[in-house]
Image (tube, helix red, strand yellow):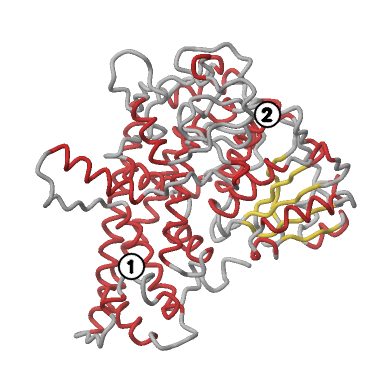
Amino acid sequence: MSSNDSGHIFNLNEEQRVLLREYWDALFDYFTVTVDYSKCTTEEEKAKERQKIIEGKLHKRSHMNLDNSFDEALDCESLNVNTTPSTPIGNDRLLSPNPDSPATPNSPSSPSKSPKAGKGKLDKRTSFNRFLRRKSNSNINGNESGGNSPTSSPPNHYNVPHYKGIAEIKLDNDNILQSMKEEFFFMMSCDEPDSVALRFLRARKWNVSRAVKMTTACLQWRIEWNVRALLEYGEQGIDEEVFKSGKAFIFGKDKENRPLSFVRVRNHNKNTVPLFESEKFTMFLLETGRLSIKPPVEMCSIVFDMTDFSMNNMDYPYVKFVLHALQNYYPECLGVCLIVNAPWIFNGCWKVIKPLLDPVVSSKVHFIKTEELKDYIDEDQLMKCYGGKNPYEYEYVPPSAEDIEMEKKLKGNDNEDKFKKIEEWRNINKEYEEITKEWITKYKNLDIKCRAENANNPDSLLKVEKGKNNSNSDNIENVTIENKEQLIKEAEEIEVKRKEIGERHKKTFQKLLPYLYTKTYYQRVKTFDYVSENDI
């Protein structure tokens, strides 16, 4: 699959364009709170009614959960990385310490809040709403006197500064939907916005309501993980040994010009690295990989090197985390997955893993030998150790003291230029939202007419969406459009303006990147950068 295939931004038919506009309309509607206060007589009742509407929009269960055996509590105040598999995090969980580290005030390792001894798993009650209430009670916005909010005080034994700005997320009920909207703009800012929307639509077979549900679940998951802060802290927030292990890294491109991620399974030992560190590392690598994609390319490819694989390398909780993240929160981002030199012992593992895969993802998995890599990767992009001609060898280079000091200055709370660029980015977010709503409105009658014309076509995507999944289903009648040619002309003019604002939106965010993202190994060794001079 390539960016030229049907359903991608450069190759949309009329029906797909209709569904794209309906997706944006439904998504913006999700972020909007409309409350009927007619039955409320007091301010307290109004507040409760508003909270009820907001909580009704949120996904009740954490989408971090992979299955019942990996349910973890969002409202638990502590993390035992040695016994707990996958644990969602907010600002206070991002740099969650090793249980053996000295406890600090308000840190997740505080003894008074530790799980009971011998309890291998945390309480299974999971609710995003409970997560929000816990955050609010923990002074997420720093409004209570005394004590530090999780946002302003990461565990001090990591020696990582806290930077105010875009990494701060307001999780009280009055702000959560706006925070989710900003998370969506953050997620799409390095892409063409419609490309992100189309990924979710394709992943849900062009069903608008399911695509929006998938999107909002993704946004909640990103907030639980606090992806913004993870990228802002960068490699300092993850155990350096994980990077040194060389178990996964990004290098080169395949023949479809898709960035390549290499996973050397033999370098992962489930008994030596806490699962939580591997999860953070994976999130970091996924986000870094996203930034390595340059339009019109929309996907990455993965090479799993199974050479010298043993059962010590087989980490089922970690595998489930990775698969769940890829399929549910990074849809349509996988080009091809090459499993190289898998030994016979892996056959049993594959029988467990394959049922977890979506059929579309499963079709992209290929078992090959080393010499077959050349069928997918040109020799100049393939490392010598795999039979190619590229001399590159992965060896982690940590940031220097000068690098760290420079990052502190760029992200410092006294850096006025950073806050100016954040404000510019937020302003163009609003501008893009307004032009998109104008675009939707201008095409409204044309889209309704298109639905009416395709209502009885069994092969139409609009037929699939008819009914409860179609926001315009009640309006599909005999639609008469006056001055159709003039309306189309005006709509196309708005579309051109929207595209221009989308380009400015991307460039505005790219100028902000140095203040939000800590430079990585890849910039230090110059294998790739997030932004080229031509992008700005």
Q: Name the residue under label 1.
A: 495
Q: How many marks overall?
A: 2
Of labels 2 and 1, earlier in sequence is 2
Q: Quadrant of residue 286?
A: top right
For the N terminus, the quadrant is bottom right
User: Is 414 on the left or on the right of 354, as rendered?
Assistant: left
**Depth check, front residue: 385 or 391:** 385
298 is higher (above) or lower (below) than 4: above
277 is higher (above) or lower (below) than 40: above
**Which residue is painted at 40% across and 26% down in the image?**
151
Residue 107 lies, in percent from the top left, at 49, 18
**Depth check, front residue: 102 or 530:** 102
Q: Which residue lies furthest to the left in this view?
A: 41
Residue 205 lies, in percent from the top left, at 51, 69
Q: Name the residue under label 2.
A: 274
Q: Which of marks 2 and 1 is in front?
A: 2
**Mark 2 Cα-neighbour bin, 10 Å: few <14, some 14–19, many ≥20:** some
| Three-letter code for the amino acid on which mark 1 is drawn | Glu
**Which residue is painted at 22% across and 84% down in the image?**
481
**Which residue is painted at 51% across and 23% down in the image?**
406
